Image (spheres, grey):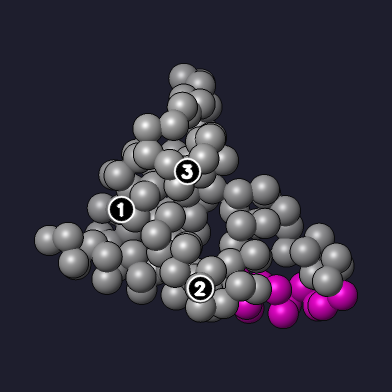
Amino acid sequence: MLLFLFFAGGEMSRHVKDLLEGWGNWSMSRIGTEYKGMSTIAPVKDDDRPWLSDEEGEIVDKAVAGLKKYDINGYNIICLHYQHHISFRAIAKNIHKRHQYISDYCEWAEAYIAGTVHTLLKATN
């Protein structure tokens, strides 16, 4: 569902952030995401956080893994922010950079992931 919304027009920046929020929740609820069939923690019924299906989560996971191979700093920022819900200011303070530097770096990483997700979806169709 989120992947459909991601490419259904509108503001691309907001959609990739929504997609990554869902991925962060999906990936942190799994034990050993690299191993298919491992146990998962299902979302609570009243939980209003965004979630991805396993199919959607695996597509985004591949895109994030591609980022890790290409740019480890971008990968780390994406994981810290979307999986562990750490603010850009806290990340910046920890590595002695300006908040805007981390924000800009994350935007670049999000654009990379958006392009990779788009490419992966085109390849499956």
Which quadrant is home to the N terminus? top left
Circle on res. 3: 1
Q: Is residue 50 visible?
A: no
Which marked residue is nearer to the observer: mark 1 or mark 3? 3
Q: Which residue is mark 3?
A: 33
Rate crowding at label 3 as few (under 14), some (14 to 19) or many (20 or more) other CA atoms within 10 Å. some
Residue extending furthest toward the left: 125
Compare marks 2 and 1 and give the one earlier in the sequence: 1
How far apart are the alpha carbons under marks 2 and 1?
23 Å
Q: Is residue 35 above or below residue 95?
A: above
Q: In front: 10, or 97? A: 97
Q: Where does the magenta region start and end?
A: 96-106
Q: Is residue 80 above or below residue 11?
A: above
State the residue at coordinates (12%, 61%). Answer: 125
- Based on the picture, tell me whether residue 54 belongs to the magenta stretch: no
Circle on res. 69: 2
